[in-house]
Image (cartoon, rainbow, N blue to C red):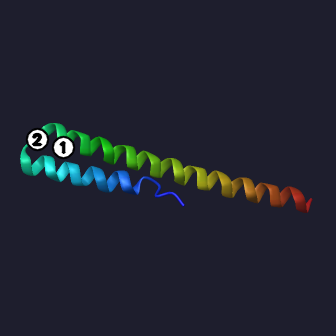
Amino acid sequence: MTDKGFTDQVKGKAKEIVGDITGDKSTKAEGLLDQAVGKAKEVVSDVKDVIDEVTDKAKEKMNKE
């Protein structure tokens, strides 16, 4: 089972907060980037799930005919 980008999002949020607290803009930027990567992975995973579902339904329909 994959985490669908969750780990990247959590890691990124932590870096963003650390960057805010320390005033380190580079760390904050890394955190925002990690969050974006995590969100992208989540979206790709969701799209893949929908495609798999549609494919399965189409196969079922073709087998009934």
Spot the residue most to the right: 65
Dot 1 corresponds to which residue? 28
Residue drawn at (74%, 58%) of the image:
56
Q: How many marks?
A: 2
Residue drawn at (18%, 42%) of the image:
27
Residue 39 percent across, percent down from the top left: 40, 49
**Which image quarter: residue 64?**
bottom right
Which three-letter amino acid code belongs to the residue tagged 2?
Answer: Asp
Q: Specify whether 15 is left or right of 61.
A: left
Which of 11 and 60 lies nearest the eye of the viewer?
11
User: Which quarter of the rendered picture does the C terminus lie within?
Assistant: bottom right
Which three-letter amino acid code belongs to the residue tagged 1?
Answer: Lys
Cα separation between marks 2 and 1? 6 Å
Residue 46 percent across, percent down from the top left: 53, 54
Residue 5 percent across, percent down from the top left: 42, 52
Q: Residues within 10 Å of mark 1 (few under 14, many from 20)?
A: many
Residue 4 percent across, percent down from the top left: 47, 55
Residue drawn at (29%, 53%) of the image:
11
Dot 2 corresponds to which residue? 24
Dot label at residue 51:
none
| Tag 2 and tag 1, C-beta contact below 8 Å | yes
Q: Residues within 10 Å of mark 2 (few under 14, many from 20)?
A: some
**Which image quarter: residue 37?**
top left
Q: Specify whether 55 is left or right of 7.
A: right
Q: Specify whether 22 is left or right of 51.
A: left
Residue drawn at (7%, 47%) of the image:
22
* Secondary structure at numbered mark 2: loop
Say above or below: 7 vs 19: below
User: Which quarter of the rendered picture does the N terminus lie within?
Assistant: bottom right
